[in-house]
Structure formats: C-alpha cells, structure tokens
Amino acid sequence: MSIRYNLDVNPATDGRIHSWGIASKRRLKTLALHYVAAIGAVALLVAIFTRLPVVPTTVALSFLLVVLVVASRWGITIAITTAVVATLAFNYFFLPPIHNFTIYEPQNWIALFAFLVSAIIASRLSERARREAENANRRRKEVERLYSLSQQLLATENVLELNNSIPQFVKDAFGLTAAAMFLPKRNEVYRTGIEHPELSDDELRAVTQRGELLINQEQQISIVPLRIGVRPVGSIGMEGASLSRETLEAVGSLIAISIERAGAVETLSRTEATRESEKLRTAILDSVTHEFRTPLTSIKASVSTLLSSANIDEAGRRDLLDVIDEETDRLNRLVGEAAEMAQLDAQRVELHIAPYRVTDIVEAALEKSRQVLDKHELRLQIPESLPDVQVDLDRIAEVLIHLLENAAKYSPENTPITVSAEPCGKMVEVSVADRGPGIDDLEQSLVFEKFYRGRDQRYRVQGTGMGLSISKAIVEAHGGTIGLTSQIGSGSVFRFTLPVA
C-alpha cells in the first residue's frame, strides 16, 4: 500500500518568492560591499597620513570629504558609520597621545566633537541633496514615460483596439511585469498575457466601485481608478513598479480621457458616415430624377408618336428611331457609370497593369471620343522621348475620355482642346486644356466629388457628375494623383500623373 501526497503549488507565486529571495541576498551583498569600501577608504587615508608629516586639520578635512562622498553615493546610514569610524581613527592615530583613545587636552575634545558633528551634519545634508536629486530624476523619467504613454493613447482611435492595447502600452511605458484594466461599461477585463492572481478581477471591480487608489508597496502592486471628473469609468492595475501617487493618478486620468476620446471619435465617425450616406442618397435621387428622367421622357415621346401616328414619313420615323437609339445609349451609359462608381468605391475593380506608351493611351481615348470632339480643334503635344507608363490601358483611356468629353461639352464650338504629356520625376503627367468658362476657386475642391456639378452648368449641360469622380478613383488606384488649374473666363487644365514603367 502506498500513500501519495498531492501538494498544490502556485508556480507564479513560488517563482516570485524565489526571485524576491535572490533580490534580498543581492541587496545584502551590495550593502556589505558598500560598508567595506567606506571603511576601507578611511583605512587607506590612515595608512597614507601616518607616513606623511601632516597636521590634524588636513586629516580631519580628508575624513570629512570621504564622509561626504559616501553620503552622496550610498546614503545616511553608511555615512554615519563612516563618520564614527573616521572619528575613532582620528582620535587613535592623530590626536595626542597617539595610539591611545585617551585625550588629555580639552581643545582636542572640542576638535574631535566638532569633527563628528560636522561629519554627521554634512552627511545628512549630502543625503538630502542625493534624495532630492533622485526624486527629481525619478519624476523626470515618470513625466517622460507619461508623455510616451499619452502619444500611444492618442495614436489609436478605434475603441476596441485601444481597450485591448492599453494594458500593453502601460506595461511597456513603465517597465511593468503585468497590467490589467477593467471597464464596467463593457464588463470586461483586458490583460497583458496570462492572468496574474495579484491583479484579480474582484479587486479591479472593487477599486472601480470605491473610486479609491490601492497601493501595495511590498508587492509593488497599484490599482488606479479611471475617472472623468468624479465619474469612475474603470480601473487599471499595475504590477512590478513603485510609482508615485501623482504619477498613478495621472496615468488613470490619461487612460480615462483616451477612452472617452476614442468613444467620442467613434460616435462622431458614425454620425458623419450617416450624414454622408444621407447626402449620397439625396444626390443619387437627384441624379436619377433629373438625368434618368430626361432620356426616358424622350424615349416615351418617340415611341408614343410612332404608335399613335400612321402618317409619319420614312424620314420622320428614322429621326424618332435615332432619338430612341441615342437616349437608350445614354441611359445605358448612366447605369454603367453608376455601377462602375460602386465597384470603385468597394475596391472590387481588378486592374490589368502593363507598360504602355502615352500615345497608345491617347489613341485609345480618341477612338471613342471622335464624335464629341468633331466641333473642336484637337492639339497633341506628346514628346516621342516619353518613357512608358505602367497602367491598365482601358481604365486610363476611360479617364482621358471623361476629361476630353468634359472639355468638349463645356467649351465653345471651334475652340481648341490640347492634350499634352511631360515627365515628372518617376511619374508622367498628362494634361487636358480647354477654353471653357473656367471653375472658381470654391468649386475646384468639389468637382471630383460624386454627383457634383457646377452651379452654373448643372442645368445647361447634360451629365451625372460621376465622370470626374470615376477618373479620380481610377488614377488613385494606379498610385497617381489628379487635379486641375482653372481661371474664370480663360478655361481649365485637368492633369493626372501615371507611374513610369
């Protein structure tokens, strides 16, 4: 018969106790070395000065200097010990009678007492200065870490991503072993890595409810309430560093503000998206009611005339059928542009990129635009030395078609339209210049928006306002840019860039 005992041991706690034991042994060893070094410095001065013809004042000042150095480096306790040892050595080796702790002359008693008091006072002052310097340095580092944390918190605007990242941000900023955050609004605890029993969910919830800071210096654990004003929004637990109360409260305020800010940005984004959606819906309805109704009205009138009148000659029938054919093509094109705009917005358009000459693009565009350009003089300024560009030929030709048709529609008859191209670093810039009425500065920033049409042209010239928006999406999908330069009464120049092959 055998008996087996099962002892439950928490590996994390056992490992922490072991590490604390090692740290305590190291601190004791370091403290012992400091004592040995301080007393050794006194012994070294005794060995030197006993072999030299020096006066007691020089010895006392040298001992005092050692005490000051020890106090500034290792603290008041070691400094006072050093002062006592130096006083005894000063009495034994340098005050008559030599090699005897007895003092005969009253003035030597006064000198010995003055040395001891001076050494203790000086060591206390030096210790105070050292502590103030350490505190100032610690506060400076904490401010730097707070600044680094604030930069990380402000860089993230997505609420879910921010909540998951905050514990890691705090851990990295202050060199912690673990961090955990509780948000009652979501009733969830966010942690860095595995769960630490010291940062329990119950303690995080309790601090959130009480709204009071919890600090355990021995275990280096702090749990800070996250407050906006007096309203608690959660708590953050930190393990592995001793931070000042002011820094802990600042961390709590920063995190609370960042969470509220991210929530406000998310709400604003949803509101803006709803507003843009409503704006787009209104624009689409306006476009449908205006642009789609015009060709439908023409088609309906032509068909009704053909059906109701039997006395129409062949020429009249031909004209009506031409109207139906043209307006049907127009409707088909409107539907096609709307579908293409939706695909471009959803980034579902596949580009077939290959190197092409700019002249190939221009020729492909002119082949489909000859009818609208019949009443204009076309001027081409394309150098033969231009490098090839890396594009989808059909898509970029479509961009040029939109620009050429716009130039033809908005320019007076018999005015020239110029197509030019020139190298621009690692890009090639293609331009279309017209002699139209021009576009004022206010509208120049709007012409590439969906369904936007100029205030003075929207009812005079047919169109949906999708051509330039489609062109912008296609050019940007190629990694280029599109823009314009315009002057009222002098025409406009639309230009776009394409990457060199």
Image (spheres, rainbow, N blue to C red):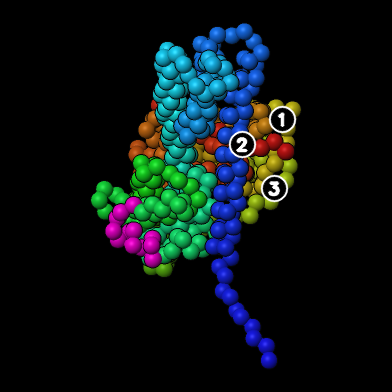
**Residue 341 visible within the image:** no
Q: Residues within 10 Å of mark 3 (few under 14, many from 20)?
A: some
- What is the C-alpha distance between the residues marked 2 and 3? 73 Å
Marks 2 and 1, Cα distance to the nearest angstrom? 78 Å
Q: Is residue 213 visible?
A: yes
Instruction: Choose mark 1 or mark 3, whichever is in front.
Output: 3
Tag 2–tag 3 contact (CB < 8 Å): no
**Depth-wise, is mark 2 or mark 1 nearer the camera?**
2
Tag 3: amino acid: Ile
Residue 424 versus residue 89: which sits nearer the camera? 89
Mark 2 and mark 3 lie on one chain; the one further toward the N terminus is 2
Q: CA distance from mark 1 to mark 3?
A: 18 Å
Looking at the picture, how far across and down is residue 45, in whole percent? 61, 19
Q: Mark 2 highlights which residue?
A: 33
Quadrant for residue 270, please give it: bottom left
Q: Which residue is mark 1?
A: 386
Q: Which mark is residue 299?
A: none
* Residue position for label 3: 353
Kindly indicate the quadrant of the structure image that contains residue 150.
top left
The stretch of residues the image draws in magenta is 202-213
Amino acid carrying mark 2 in the image? Leu
